[in-house]
Structures are given as structure tokens and as C-alpha cells.
Amino acid sequence: MDISFSAEEQAFREEARDWLRSNVPMQPRPHHGEAMVEFDRAWQRRQFDAGWAGVAWPKEFGGRGLSLLQQLIWLEEYASAGAPAVGCYYVALNHGGPTLIALGTDEQKAFYLPRILSGETIWCQGFSEPGAGSDLASLRMRAEIDGDHLVVNGQKIWTTYAQHARYQELLVRTDSNGPKKHHGITWVICDMESPGIDIRPIKCMDGTEHFCEVFYDNVRIPLKNVVGDINDGWRVTMTTLGFERGTGLLFDQIELNNYVEHLLELCRNKALPGSVGRAIDDGELIARLGNLKAEVTALRAMSYKTISTAQRGAPGPEATMVALYTVETMQKAFRLGMELQGGDALLLPGHPGSMQFNYLNSFIHTIGGGTSEIRRNIIGERALGLPR
Amino acid sequence: MNLLLSDEQQMIADAIGDVLLQEYPLDRLHGGSATMAPNQWQQIAELGWLGLGLDDGVGGVGYGLAEEMLLCRASQRHLLSPSLLAAILGAHVAAVNAPEAVAGIVAGETTVALAVPRKPVSLLEDLLDVELLLIDPENAEYVLLWDTEAAVMLSASQLKQVAVAGVDNSIGLSVASGSVAPFVRATRGEADIYARALVLLAAMETGLAEGVRDMAVDYAKVREQFGQAIGAFQAIKHACADMACRVEAADCQLRMAVVSQSSGETDLLVQAAAARLLAGEAARENATRNIQVHGAMGYTAECNAHWFLKRARLLEQVSAPPRHLQRHVLGLPVGRFESVG
């Protein structure tokens, strides 16, 4: 066990810090609409121009090809510099792109990958359906082969940023007669400007239109857009999910640590609701804040250990434990932030990043990308070996 | 950066685990006790366990806190006497100002007991007016207590002792009082016993939490109701998953605390206190859930589940209480004369 970084890694840290310090946008990230898209695009472009786009991608596909430890350092510096979340480019950079790198054809790689890195194209994910949420493999949206095209009819839902995306990683049912529901699924790249696509944004509890319903009416997708083979989409999907190496949550964890420090600062200067004394002198509150700080401190340790394991090979189900622990801790932190404000918690400031907005927004974390219940199932079955 | 055990550390952990499995099965507690006999102390002393992290120049084995952590973590899977911790820390205290006493402790010939103060005492005074609960005091020659400022060992023979019944009935308990000059004292500047103890107690609690996690999971796989193993029910499965998460968080933070110490990081106290907060919570909560998973069987004396809960409650009382730990992690001061030894 060892916490030190090599001289080379330290030098890399300096390089990353220097660039970030003079390039991170000063203004806060807008949290919805065209303003958000423009902000994300400008930031992605700036990183691309300086060679910092796709830090985890191999060099041969235009990425920076950083080692796991360098990615860790980059993300630590990135978050410490107050750089914005990956935002609209999450699916393209962390899902679609890596899937093409692993399983795409040369033609697919050559066309799509550069357009992701440069910020030209945003991607979205067409996985969930009204009848297939946690039970993703039960998806039913049909695609029939017609000549050299797939013809798609049906509906997807909870598609984040569908209204802003040019491409979609789409799962469709190409065979309903397979022995198991995992068979007969195909992973295909869908151009969101194709005729027959109808996108209807869904208004969320935080007021944003974070995700959409997407309807497909005889949408024709060229067969050359299929990644992997027809009916082999489940394996392709699992490949993408298997990319987690412990770095995926570092940004959120560092932001969360900053948030808890901010709460402590608030406690020094603020009275608690129903009290004239300073919040910091309240034993119960300090107990809660102290426990929260301990959990947030452990998140860093958990990611460090996952990364240590990933350097030897694929990390095990402990990556799911880190994810569960992170999202649950986030919700606790944002709940405490609301309570600390007393009556002011009723206000909804217009600017993004307010405590009220964070609180409302935090409910997505225990649902999206696998609910906490599904994560507990995975931990119970894959880490502990309990029966299904 | 690497938070995995080195090959040598893994070998040490495996060797310790093997001995404990052979010599200290939990079933020894039925009609028996966790109090260790003189020959048992000598056996673990011969394995080098009592001087594992002590410099070889003062009679130790010459490893460090990491190896002590591995030993303490494994010890509570088997509910070894907490006097193991007293011996490890006592040897460090003696090494500072009573080097002649180190050999006896490391050889397992002189045993040390942990003490929980029943009233505040400042350990920097020449004469200490103490009222203590002694944990597993049978045959103990010294009594160890510490706070943020100093650690002291008192001669047990100078204290008036009355044996009392304790909640953790796997070991003895006594009430001890007296006005005594310490046999040896090490101030914070001489040896950071406070932070070392936080890490090792966190290790013990993490090991305990691991032990009950495995016990609950093993039972959930074989106990059947409604025609299937109860571990297939989400109510049980999720309880077990939460137990695993608590262990994972405590274990990772424990490793971070250990490497903070060895690399001389300035935030050792923060890292160690965070580890102890999470490990204590994991030990208490997992021990509680384990009883529930076992159903009525978990409530019986015959089932081993209760030993873990009682030990978790006992460890909670040793050294800093959670409210001090919470202040440490936030970087807030702790009241000066509050004894935490």
C-alpha cells in the first residue's frame, strides 16, 4: 500500500493544473436549453484544440491515451479547478465512443470518433422503454430488416438530451423468438435527424427538460450502422458497461467534498432554524456533518482502491458498491444542505448549482444508470453470491 | 498510488488468518472465554504478533502500522481479547520511556489491559486520580489508557479492583480506582498513540464487520423459508449488500489512514478519525443486522451472533467517542480536559 505518485506523475499533475487554471470557463454552466448546449460545446472544443479531449481514449483514435493513474490525476485537477461536468457529451465520450473503439468497424470509427472528440456531435442513449426499465433486456421495440436497412417502429423513454443529440446508441429487438430475452437485441447507431423520429421532452421535478420520450415511425437505419452483429446487442451493451475502472465517479466525489466544506463554512456563519446560536455549536448538526464528511472522505479511498484493482485487471463488483455509496451519500449531503437553510430553502434561485436545485436534482442519482435497488441486487448476487 | 496489499503483506495476512482459524474458533466461547491463557500469549508472541510494528532496534519485528492493522482486523473476526491491542500499544508506550518493559510485553509474559475512564482525568498530571473499567483484567500487570495528549501505563497492583459482570461476557470486567503515579508515560510529541489507536481500533471494527457480513451471507444461502433460500429475498439480500458496502467503505478508508501515516501526511488525524467513524458504524450496524438475518436463532446464546454485537459495543467505548471523531474529521477542536483514553 502506497499513496505516493511518481515524479513523472507529479509533473503530469502540474501540466494538467496549469492548463486547467488558464482555460476553465469562469461562468457557471447553464443547466438547460440551448445555452447549456452551447456552453458544453465551447468547453469540449477548447479541450479538443489543446489535446485534452478524450483523455481516456487511445491515441490512435485521437484521444490522449492516459494511463489510469494519469486519468485519476487529470480528474482530480479537473474537479479542483472547478471545471464543468462532462454534461451533454457524457454518452458520446463515455459510452458510444468507447463502444465503437472496442467493437466498431474501421469505417464507423473513422466517421464518428473524430466528430465526438471535437464536440461536433452529441450522442444520446436509447435503451429504456416504457415496459423495460430496470429489466432492460425485456425491451420490445421492433426493427425489421428491409434490404440493407433496419426499419424501426416503437418508443424509447428517459432518453437524456435526445432533443440536443445528433446520434443515438439504440437498442432494438430484431428477434423475438430467441431462447432468452437477452438474445435478439441489436445495438445500432441512429441518426436523430432521420425522418419518422418524434422527440417529446419530459419536464422533470427540477424544472429542466433533462430527458425525453422518443417515438419511431418507420425510421430507416442503414445496416452498416449496426455495431457488433445483428442479435448480438446485449454483449455489445455489456462491453460498454464493463468499461468502469474506478474513475467514473471521481468528479462527483470531489464536487461533493467541496459541497460538504461549503456546508461547514455555512455552519460557521449561520444560525440554525429556530435558534439564535451558530450552527457550528449545535452538537447534533456537527455529528451529522462529521459523519457525512467521513463518508465523503471514504469515497476517495474507495475510488483509489478500485483504480488500484483495475490496474491489475478488471475490477470486480466493488465498483457497484462505490457507485451505490456515492449516490446515497450525495442525497444525504443535499438533504442536509436544504435543512441548514431554514426558511430560505423555500426559494428557488435562478442560477444553477444552488443548494435547492442540487437537492431536487439529486433524486436522479439513485434512479438513473441503475437504481439503488438494482445495484443492491448486483452486490448481493455478484459480490456475495446470494441466490437470484 | 496503490491501495492493494503488497505480496508480503498478503502473506502476513494469510498466515495470521490461518493461525486464528486453527486456534481460535468462535465455538471456544461456548462455556469458555476469550481471555487468553499464558501459553496462548506466548504462542502469538513467538509468531511476532505483539511487536509486529515496533522497530527492531527496541525489540520489535520492524514492520509498521500496515501489518499491525492486518493483525487487528483479523483478530476481531475471531473475537480475540482486546488485550491484544493493549499489548501492541503498550509496547510502543514502553519503548519511549521504559525500554526495560518492552521485552516482557512483546514476549507475551507481561499482559496489559485496556481501561475505560468512568470520570475525566488529565493524563499529564504527576499523580492520576482514576476510576476505571478494566477490560479483560485477569492476570494483567499493566493498565493502558490514553487521550489526545498522552498515553500512560499504570501498575494494576496499585489499583483497587472489584470484578463486575459485563455486557460482553466473553471476557472479564472490573471496576478499578486509585490515586497513582504512572509506571510510564509517553506524550503526544514522543509517540502518537492516539492516532495509532484510532487506526487499530478501526481495523478491529472493520474485521468484526467483515466477520458478521460473512456470517449473515452464509446463513442467508442455506436457511430456507417459503421454499427458497432467504438470501433470494430482496429484504435479506439488500440488508447483506448494505453490510458489504459498510465494510468496503471502512476498509478502503482504513487503508487510506494507514498510508497517510506511513507517508507522513499532515491529515493523518482526519483520515484515521474518518476510518474509525465508518468502522464503528459498520461493526455496530452489521452486528445488529446479522442478528435480524438469523431470526429467532440470532437471539439465542447458542448462536455466535450476539458475541459480535457485544464486542462492537465494547470497542465503541474504547478511546475517542463518535462525537470527538466527528469533530476531528471536520477539523474542529475537541474540549481539552475530556479524557478519551
Image: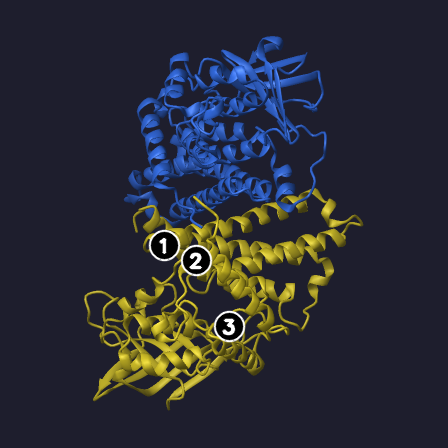
Chain colours: A yellow, B blue
Identify the residue shown where x is 48% and y is 20%.
Answer: B169
Rendering coords of residue A361 (x, y %): 56, 66
Q: Secondary structure at mark 2?
A: helix
Tell me whether circle 1 and circle 2 mark residues in contact (CB < 8 Å).
yes
Asked where in the image residue B318 lies, by quadrant, the reply is: top right
Residue A110's disc number = none
Viewer-nearest of discs 3 and 2: 2
Which amino acid is tagged 1?
Gln
Tell me whether circle 3 and circle 2 mark residues in contact (CB < 8 Å).
no
Rendering coords of residue A220 (x, y %): 30, 88
Residue A87's disc number = 3
What's the CA distance linking mark 3 and mark 2? 23 Å
Report the residue marked by disc 2. A69
What's the CA distance linking mark 1 and mark 2? 9 Å
Q: Secondary structure at mark 1?
A: helix
On the rendered structure, is B306 left or right of B175? left
Which amino acid is tagged 3?
Gly
What's the CA distance linking mark 1 and mark 3? 27 Å
Label 2 crowding class (10 Å Cα cut-off): few <14, some 14-19, many 20+? some
Report the residue marked by disc 1. A311
Viewer-nearest of discs 1 and 3: 1
Chain-order first, disc 3 or disc 2: 2
Label 1 crowding class (10 Å Cα cut-off): few <14, some 14-19, many 20+? some
Task: Please report, as a chain letter, where disc 3 is located.
Answer: A
Farthest residue in the right direction?
A276
On the rendered structure, is B122 left or right of B265? right
Q: Is residue B145 visible?
A: yes
| Looking at the image, residue B70 lies above or below residue B121 | below
Rendering coords of residue A291 (x, y %): 59, 45
